[in-house]
Amino acid sequence: MNSQDKGVEKKSGQKSQNPSSFTVFWRNKYARIGLIITVGFFVMGFIGPLVYPAPKIDLTEIFAPPSLAHPLGTDYLGRDTLGDIIYGTGYILEVTFIAALIGTGIGVAIGIASGYFRGAVGSLLMAITDIVLTIPGMILILVVASVVRSGNPLIVAGVLSVTAWAGFARAIRSQILSLRSSIFVEEARLLNLSSFHIIFKELMPNVMSYTAINFIFSVQGALFASVGLYFLGVLPFSAYNWGVMLSEATSFGGFLAPSLAVYLISPIAVITLFTVGLIYLSFGIDEVFNPRTRRR
Amino acid sequence: MDELQEVGIQAKTSLLYFDNVSVHFEIKGMDKPLIAVDGVSFSMNDGELAALVGESGSGKSTLGRVVVGLQKPTSGKALFRGKDIYKLKGKAFLEYRRSVQLVHQDPYAALNPALTIYESLAPALRRWNIVDKKDTRKAVSSMLEFVGLRPENYIDKYPNQLSGGERQRICVARALSVRPKLVVADEPVTMIDVSLRLSIVDLLLNSKKQFGTSYIFITHDMALARYFLLKGGGGKLMVMENGKLVEMGDVEEVINNPKHEYTKKLIESVTE
């Protein structure tokens, strides 16, 4: 490359180059808060257990109020509530993010394939999707979960995404159907660009914003579903789990006295905070993937 | 016999040769099909200019789509270099596909909103191996320069940051990027601000001068068609009404001595 070219590139860098994705993201106040919260949970989940002592059963400390030793008090077995939350975070993150990845991945793949390849393939994929859509999701999850009875995060995530992809696949398909007959795709065909190019370069970017948002909402859905499954006791009880905590707090004395409110509210607050973080994060993701929001 | 042979030779040597081409659309709930194009015959040679004039609904856009390979005719022959466009295969199809391009009426819909200008223009260059991979950015820059846009101000922009005129220039750049022999420009300036229209038309003519590109310029505006052909050094004026080609001839001749009532009406409506 000669010096003249460099000059041109440099100029374009100063004058008209688009702001980087992160800059666009960071400009949004909500996105900033969401990112900080979500990253905070990851730090808590994966670094927390290294620095915070594991909660132990201590029958001399049952239902202790918040103190320096136990910032959020203790539960009915004298275990440290904050410790329970910290040690439960990693598992929740694994389950919810893997479930969202599976659900969103299958949804995008089937949605795009059935929207782009009309004919036998598309019809078959949509028939399968429609059948899955008619199955009541939460009940199927309950049944499958009580049969499987595994605490393995991969398996739980798989169970949670059994039906989660179907509605999303349909939504993506309808977007692809309208996009594939758009004029810019027609132009790409006139230039003899490949189906691979059209799918991945012309169509995909147009559904990325929606996909990312769906991913975030899937994490949220998987969080509620997994907490619900543990709360109902469908999945095997394991130590350190927000759902289990919530279940225990309600059945083993969380309502007994006002002084125990911290014990009951802690898992609820942490689930709510995680959800809020995800929703705020989705605001920023929308800005990043939606070129219309990228201003000069 | 002689006449037939002559037609045969013309069909083979012409860039484009249409013989009695019709397009019918079957519409549900209607007994008769809609006749969009009705027995149209014409031919185009390399480097020739043609303007296709008619009111909306006259079938001129449908005819344009037949030319670029997007609308299979119901009957008649649509030949490119002597071969039926809709039966082309392999190498011949690829040559046709590269040689005939379209500039669409709506520059707002013709560019992918999710891609930057570079991302919209580069794939075609790569697809046809027009430049080496490392020179792609430079080639896109020079394309932008050709259509009168400063590359550094446009190459990384998204379409939504540009005006209609700027977008149409980019669409022209994209159509010309594969060095086509024939470009169908379907109402290319209708959606553009009046003050910028002629500059886009001049841009098309510029490419004719530089690369010898043929044009079929579709418009409802007789004055614009005349400007296009006269400024481009003459060409064929074709007038379409209700799917039929009612008049065809050299632009000056048709304008000065129109034979068909409809053509007269169109010309009068301009001069008044």
Image: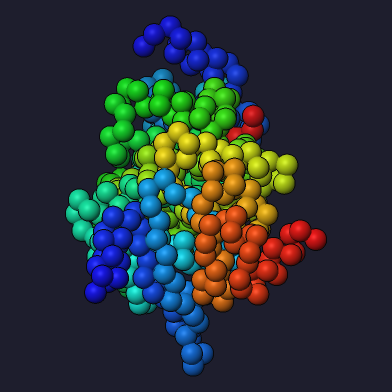
Q: On the image, which quarter does residue A143 sit in?
A: bottom left
Rendering coords of residue B231 (x, y %) = 59, 43
Residue ID at (63%, 48%): B227
Q: Who is closer to the viewer here, A17 or A19? A: A17
Q: Is A105 placed left or right of B111 in the picture?
A: left
Q: On the image, which quarter does residue A234 sit in?
A: bottom left
Residue ID at (33%, 47%): B98
Q: Who is closer to the viewer here, B130 or A254? A: B130
Rendering coords of residue A200 (x, y %) = 36, 45
Q: Residue furthest bottom?
A: B31
Q: Residue furthest top?
A: A3
Quadrant containing the N terminus of chain A in the rendered view: top left
Q: Is residue A198 visible?
A: no
Q: Who is closer to the viewer here, A284 or A35? A: A284
Q: Residue furthest left?
A: B90
Residue ID at (26%, 70%): B2
Count of residue discs = 0
As drawn, A180 above or below B262: above
